[in-house]
Amino acid sequence: MLKKLFTWYNKLCYDKTNKKGDIMEKEVSNNNLTVFDIANFFRSKEAMTHKKLQKLVYYAYAWYIALYNDTKDNLLNKLCIDTTFEAWVHGPVCKKLYDFYSNNYGQVDKYKGHLNELIVGDLKKFLEEIYKVFGKYTGDELEVMSHNEYPWQNARNTLSPSEPSNNIISEVDMFVYYNNLNG
């Protein structure tokens, strides 16, 4: 699953090489997108549970940090502005997104509106690839995946599995963990 994501990313970088074979600067960088713009992109694919939407947005955010930054000490390139994820019992959750959809009884309708005009080119390809890799799983399956990953585990630290938490999942942890998966 993750190998597909890295294969796509390496192809993207290869396609941006100059005649000498040097990788040119990444065209995708910090965006003026909100977490709702990213959620609407995934919602435009299908109706889904709130849990699945949270996890898709989390994986897009975390992988973006890992793939579009060069060092953990300078995480300037972010998928969306003013976004954090908390280590809740059922996995990573963006509180703003949760508050917005919390009255939907666990289901989120398919989005039929217009997507943000900034979701084009390499950014759109990136989000499509995230959906291709993670969109085939249920919210419960994505929850189990996130529970087995260091960023969520580290943010929860010594909390019991059922203990509530608002602990922020570290972007540095996201960068290091997801980059290490590439070996």
Image: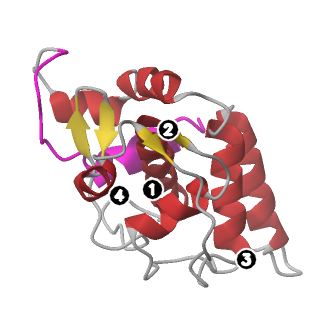
Q: Name the residue beneath numbered marker 1.
A: 61
Q: Amino acid at mark 3?
A: Gly
The answer to whether marks 4 and 1 mark residues whose Cβ atoms lie closer than 8 Å is: no
Q: Is residue 149 visible?
A: yes
Report x, y in % for residue 67: 55, 57
Q: Residues within 10 Å of mark 1 (few under 14, many from 20)?
A: many
The answer to whether marks 4 and 3 mark residues whose Cβ atoms lie closer than 8 Å is: no
Q: Secondary structure at mark 1?
A: helix
Sequence-first tag of 4 and 1? 1
Q: Amino acid at mark 4?
A: Lys
Sequence-first tag of 4 and 2? 4
Q: Judge left or right: residue 104 versus residue 28.
A: left
Magenta segment boundaries in residue numbering: 161-183
Q: Residue drawn at (41%, 70%), measured in percent from left and top?
A: 80
Classify the position of the N terminus by image quarter. top right
Select label 1 or label 2 by which is in front: 1
Classify the position of the C terminus by image quarter. top right
Q: Judge left or right: residue 102 versus residue 29.
A: left
Sequence-first tag of 1 and 2? 1
Q: Name the residue beneath numbered marker 4.
A: 72
Q: Secondary structure at mark 2?
A: helix
Q: Name the residue beneath numbered marker 3.
A: 121
Report x, y in % for residue 44: 64, 59
Residue 178 falls inside the magenta stretch: yes
Q: Name the residue beneath numbered marker 2.
A: 180
Sequence-first tag of 2 and 3? 3
Report x, y in % for residue 137: 61, 29
Up/down of 33 relative to 137, above or below:
below
